[in-house]
Image: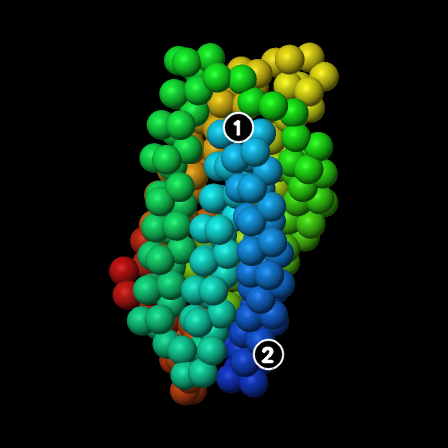
Amino acid sequence: MGTLAPTPQPVADAERLRLAGRARMLSWVSLVYMSAEGAIAVTAGVLAGSVALVGFGLDSAIEGFASAIIVWRFTGHRVFSEAAERRAQRLVAIQFLVLAPYVGVESLRAIVTGERPDSSVVGIALAAASLAVMPYLGIAKARLADRLGSAATRGEGRQNLLCAYLAGALLLGLVGNMAFGAWWLDPAVGLLIAGVAVREGIEAWRGDGCACVAGPEPGPGSARRRGDDGCDGPG
């Protein structure tokens, strides 16, 4: 008589608490960094008249709020709460969608009016720093998301990776404007920020890309049901 395949078991409580603590720690690091990054970027963007730099700063503020959501989600009894996971997932998704309208409208206005931003050495240095820091945070959170079965954590990690991509595009636009007077690169990067934010917001809301593991609810054999999209949850 053949043996049945073992039923997937939920992550052990102690291990889940350890992983949750790491997720909180990474989110605190992100929150501190994003707060400083956002303040510097918005100030430098206003001074230089750069819509892309201001948009980058607003994106940093929104990502910081997403980090605060993950800290909330993995604190106390919410570590094992499915309802908290769903709420956090949707709140993180909303952060993407809040950014897009402002940056998109301002970028189009800059293109139509031909408004030329000034050079910003501070903005260039900030973009270069984010290009170095953000990929590490994004990849680390993606790995934790897989082990925790948390679409909310994966969404926050995607925001960090988005920040890295946008930092690269922003760096190209700022250097191009400074070196070659290519002023149109600035609002073009702004439109890129808006478009990518919409796409990522929709994917985060759906929980796309969530690699599922057994769920967080404690108890023997209490694996969570997987939805049709491959993510944990009630479907």
Q: Residue 8 appears at what percent x and percent y?
A: 47, 73
Callout 2 secondary element: helix
Where residue 167 appears, x then y in whole percent? 61, 37
The reply, left or right, for residue 125 in relation to residue 9 is right
**Splitting the image into 4 quarters, where does residue 15 fall?**
bottom right
- Label 1, label 2: how far apart the Cα atoms are: 45 Å
**Residue drawn at x 56%, y 56% as measured from the top left:** 35
Identify the residue position indicated by label 1 in the image: 49
- Amino acid, disc 1: Gly
**Of 159 and 1, the residue lying toward us:** 159
**Residue 122 appears in which quarter of the rendering?**
top right
Residue hosting label 2:
18
Q: Is residue 191 left or right of residue 39?
A: left
**Residue lying at 66% horizontally and 30% vertically, measured from the top left:** 120
Residue 130 visible (yes or no): yes
Q: Position of residue 148 (x, y in %)?
A: 51, 68
Q: From what the image shows, is residue 231 above or below residue 10?
A: above
- For the point 56% across and 49% down, the residue is 39
Quadrant containing the C terminus in the rendered view: bottom left
